[in-house]
């Protein structure tokens, strides 16, 4: 460990000095989220060895088959955050409604999370992750549904934990984007990427599920065809775990796109969830000099009407996002 590999809690406490409202409970909240991440990381890393692979046999509110690790990850967060009195309630991709901790009468935050992102990759040993988003309660001591239906610009912190070749935490509190790598011999996250910013790379990566080509509108198809017919074509990279595809765009630069799909021509829709996928990653992108749009507007400025609302997502290097959105939407920023 050299002197710049400072341990996560020290880093947060140093950051916290700039947080007038945080009285140490913010540090504890982030530490609890990290503890949940360590517990999930341990299970992810041995998933192949114990009977944790495969499906649970039931569906979640999204109508998706729930993998055992989704359940395990969701319970890890619930068990830990329900004991943290600064948390008034949580909302999760795996739960139809938020869970309110009514006894926490001094609560100051609520947390939304995708406990396990990239579930379809669990059984094939491809990187998966956890995405989280933290808001201050509108009224301290009470948590209601309105606390969860907030614009992403109101988040006080957001981040993800990536269970990949190493386990990494990337988060922002609005003071830059920082990456920590888990040293499992110490059980500590150590600072490994201070002050991340999304580059504007000469070698341009784009990330999209081309298998949906026939479900896109004409302008989207034209834009993707345009990317392929450059003198120096873009490189396509698609992992199928949003958290991994985003992390590559953060480190190398590039754009991740999940456009509206017109499977149902009368009701085109996005796939990714605003509150616990798009918003937290958009806060990170913005604090790293990038941007995120739903094709019409800044992701962080969308006022949600429902908890599990889905949106199209264009996120990554700002100039690439702007180019894609203006091409596909005919100039609408
Ligand atoms: P989750 O596993 O939390 O349901 O998220 C899966 C999401 C996201 O991780 C990824 O970008 C996207 O689904 C992949 O969708 P396709 O398989 O349709 O490409
Ligand atoms: Mn997800
Ligand atoms: Mn998930």
Image (cartoon, rainbow, N blue to C red):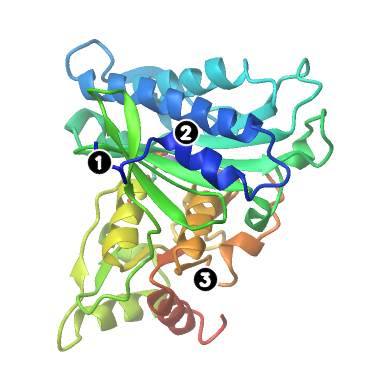
In the depicted view, which residue is nearer to us: 250 or 44? 250
Q: Which image quadrant for residue 183?
A: top left
Q: SS for tag 1?
A: loop
Q: Residue at x 41, y 51 (%)?
A: 178
Residue 41 % position (x, y): 31, 26
Q: Residue at x 47, y 45 (%)?
A: 159
* Residue where numbered disc 3 is placed: 295
Of callouts 2 and 1, the N-terminal one: 1
- Taking the view exactly as shown, the residue that stands out farthest to the top is 51
Residue 101 % position (x, y): 72, 20
Looking at the image, is mark 2 or mark 3 nearer the viewer? 2
* Residue where numbered disc 2 is placed: 9
Rate crowding at label 2 as few (under 14), some (14 to 19) or many (20 or more) other CA atoms within 10 Å: some
Left/right of residue 216 with respect to residue 308 in the rendered view: left
In the depicted view, which residue is nearer to us: 93 or 76? 76
Q: CA distance from mark 3 to mark 1?
A: 44 Å
Of callouts 2 and 3, the N-terminal one: 2
In the depicted view, which residue is nearer to us: 129 or 215? 129
Instruction: Indicate if the residue with disc 2 has its beta carbon within 8 Å of ligand 3.
Output: no
Q: CA distance from mark 2 to mark 1?
A: 16 Å
Q: CA distance from mark 2 to mark 3?
A: 37 Å
Looking at the image, is mark 3 or mark 1 nearer the viewer? 1
Q: SS for tag 2?
A: helix
Q: Residue at x 82, y 29 (%)?
A: 142
Rate crowding at label 3 as few (under 14), some (14 to 19) or many (20 or more) other CA atoms within 10 Å: many
Instruction: Indicate if the residue with disc 3 has its beta carbon within 8 Å of ligand 1.
Output: no
Is residue 132 at all visible to an observer of this figure? Answer: no
């Amino acid at each position: 460990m050299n002197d710049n590999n400072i341990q996560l809690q020290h880093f947060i406490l140093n950051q916290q000095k700039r947080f007038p409202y945080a009285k140490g409970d913010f540090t504890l909240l982030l530490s609890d989220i990290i503890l949940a991440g360590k517990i999930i990381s341990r299970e992810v890393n041995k998933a192949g060895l114990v009977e944790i692979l495969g499906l649970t046999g039931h569906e979640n509110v999204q109508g998706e088959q729930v993998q055992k690790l989704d359940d395990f990850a969701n319970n890890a967060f619930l068990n830990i955050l329900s004991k943290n009195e600064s948390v008034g309630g949580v909302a999760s991709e795996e739960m139809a409604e938020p869970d309110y901790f009514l006894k926490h009468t001094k609560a100051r935050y609520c947390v939304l999370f995708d406990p396990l992102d990239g579930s379809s990759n669990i059984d094939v040993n491809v990187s998966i992750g956890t995405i989280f988003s933290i808001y201050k309660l509108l009224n301290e001591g009470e948590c209601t549904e309105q606390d969860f239906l907030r614009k992403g610009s109101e988040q006080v912190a957001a981040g993800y934990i990536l269970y990949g070749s190493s386990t990494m935490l990337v988060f922002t509190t609005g003071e830059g984007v920082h990456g920590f790598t888990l040293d499992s011999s110490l059980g500590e996250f150590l600072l490994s990427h201070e002050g991340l910013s999304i580059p504007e790379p000469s070698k341009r990566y784009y990330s999209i599920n081309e298998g949906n080509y026939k479900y896109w509108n004409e302008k989207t198809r034209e834009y993707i065809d345009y990317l392929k017919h450059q003198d120096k074509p873009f490189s396509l990279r698609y992992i199928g775990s949003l958290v991994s595809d985003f992390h590559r765009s953060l480190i190398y630069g590039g754009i991740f796109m999940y456009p509206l799909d017109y499977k149902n021509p009368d009701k085109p829709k996005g796939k990714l969830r605003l509150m616990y996928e798009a918003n937290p990653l958009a806060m990170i992108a913005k604090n790293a000099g990038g941007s995120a749009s739903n094709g019409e507007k800044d992701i962080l400025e969308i006022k949600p009407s429902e908890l599990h609302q889905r949106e199209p997502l264009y996120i990554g290097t700002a100039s690439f996002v702007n180019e894609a959105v203006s091409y596909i939407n005919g100039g609408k920023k």
